[in-house]
């Protein structure tokens, strides 16, 4: 059985865990710009079924965007909320996510996060960028990472890219859609070059015909076959994180 609950660490965090005496590694889901909703909890449950303890942080909590309860999360992003969520996404900085993630991990370490296990980070859209920023800052905590249909993942300056390349280590998986306008072939090549080194075991999968948002079930371009391939890779990564 999979259990889901809402914690405050010190902001809202959805916790999804298998009912077992020996929980697997901690997996942190970094949402896309549309934030925490039913689709993200569905993804969390899918990953929990693979044996991980999963958390989905509501990074928009600091701006007053409250979930309140997981029972009433919307199945789709309402049209009237789109502009508000887009504005929150623009307001949320990478540093906000980095510092909030550290506070969350500190909160979870007693009783929730398995001792001694490497944390797995999974990010969607802008959340893929957040995975890389957090992994750069906390390389000892995050050595297993999956970035799916990411946007603006690489820093703009050569110095910042060099710093990221130097810091991130471990196993890194990128899932792209061949029809995603945010990641044309030249951008995928840049990502490959950025992490082509000894400290990172990198894998890149370009899903033929898939578009932006292909891995999230409530987005218009959701592609279940491509998403299934990614989650098979994530299952392997959970084994690595044990």
Image (cartoon, rainbow, N blue to C red):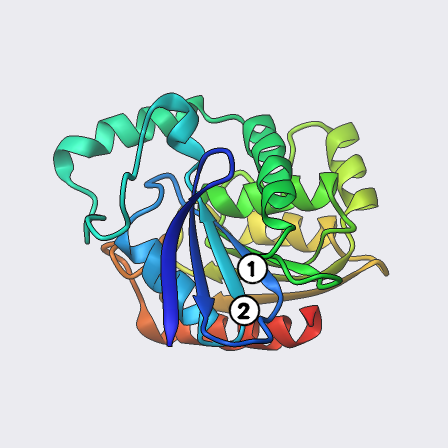
Picture residue at 35% right of the left edge, 55% below the top? 40
Residue 226 visible in rendering: no
Q: What kind of element bears circle 2?
A: loop
Q: Nearer the viewer, residue 141 or 80?
A: 141
Q: Is 14 left, or right, of 189 in this rendering?
A: left
* Marks 2 and 1 in Cβ contact (< 8 Å): yes
Q: Is residue 174 above or below residue 94?
A: below
Q: Nearer the viewer, residue 21 or 24?
A: 21
SS at mark 1 in the image: strand
Instruction: Give the labeled residue for mark 2.
Output: 52
**For the C terminus, which image quadrant?**
bottom right
The residue depicted at 21 percent of the width and 44 percent of the height is 77
- Gap in angstroms between the C-alphas marked 2 and 1: 6 Å
Q: Is residue 84 left or right of residue 64?
A: left
* Residue plotted at (53% across, 64% down): 53
Whichever of callouts 2 and 1 sits on the residue coming sooner in the sequence is: 1
As drawn, is 183 to the left or to the right of 223?
A: right
Q: Pinpoint residue 14: horizontal percent, then vertical percent.
A: 41, 50
The picture places residue 224, in percent across and down from the top left corner, at 32, 72
Q: Position of residue 133 (x, y in %)?
A: 64, 39
- Of residue 191 and residue 132, the one placed in the foreground of this image is 132
Residue placed at 37% from the left, 60% from the top?
A: 4
| Residue 220, visible in the rendered structure | yes
Residue of label 1:
27
């Amino acid at each position: 059985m999979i259990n889901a609950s809402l914690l405050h660490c010190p902001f809202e965090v959805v916790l999804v865990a298998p009912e077992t005496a020996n929980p697997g590694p901690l997996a942190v889901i970094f949402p896309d710009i549309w934030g925490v909703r039913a689709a993200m909890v569905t993804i969390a449950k899918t990953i929990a079924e693979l044996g991980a303890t999963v958390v989905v942080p509501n990074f928009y909590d600091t701006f007053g965007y409250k979930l309140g309860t997981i029972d009433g999360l919307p199945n789709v992003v309402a049209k009237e909320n789109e502009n508000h969520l887009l504005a929150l996404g623009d307001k949320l900085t990478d540093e906000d996510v980095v510092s909030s993630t550290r506070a969350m991990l500190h909160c979870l370490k007693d009783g929730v996060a398995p001792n001694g296990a490497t944390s797995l980070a999974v990010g969607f859209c802008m959340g893929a960028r957040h995975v890389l920023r957090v992994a750069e800052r906390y390389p000892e905590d995050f050595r297993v990472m999956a970035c799916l249909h990411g946007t603006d993942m690489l820093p703009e300056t050569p110095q910042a890219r060099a710093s990221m390349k130097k810091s991130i280590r471990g196993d890194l998986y990128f899932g792209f859609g061949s029809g995603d306008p945010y990641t044309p072939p030249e951008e995928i090549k840049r990502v490959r070059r950025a992490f082509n080194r000894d400290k990172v075991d990198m894998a890149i999968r370009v899903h033929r015909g898939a578009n932006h948002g292909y891995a999230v079930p409530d987005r218009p371009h959701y592609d279940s076959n491509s998403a299934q391939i990614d989650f098979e890779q994530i299952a392997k990564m959970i084994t690595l994180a044990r």
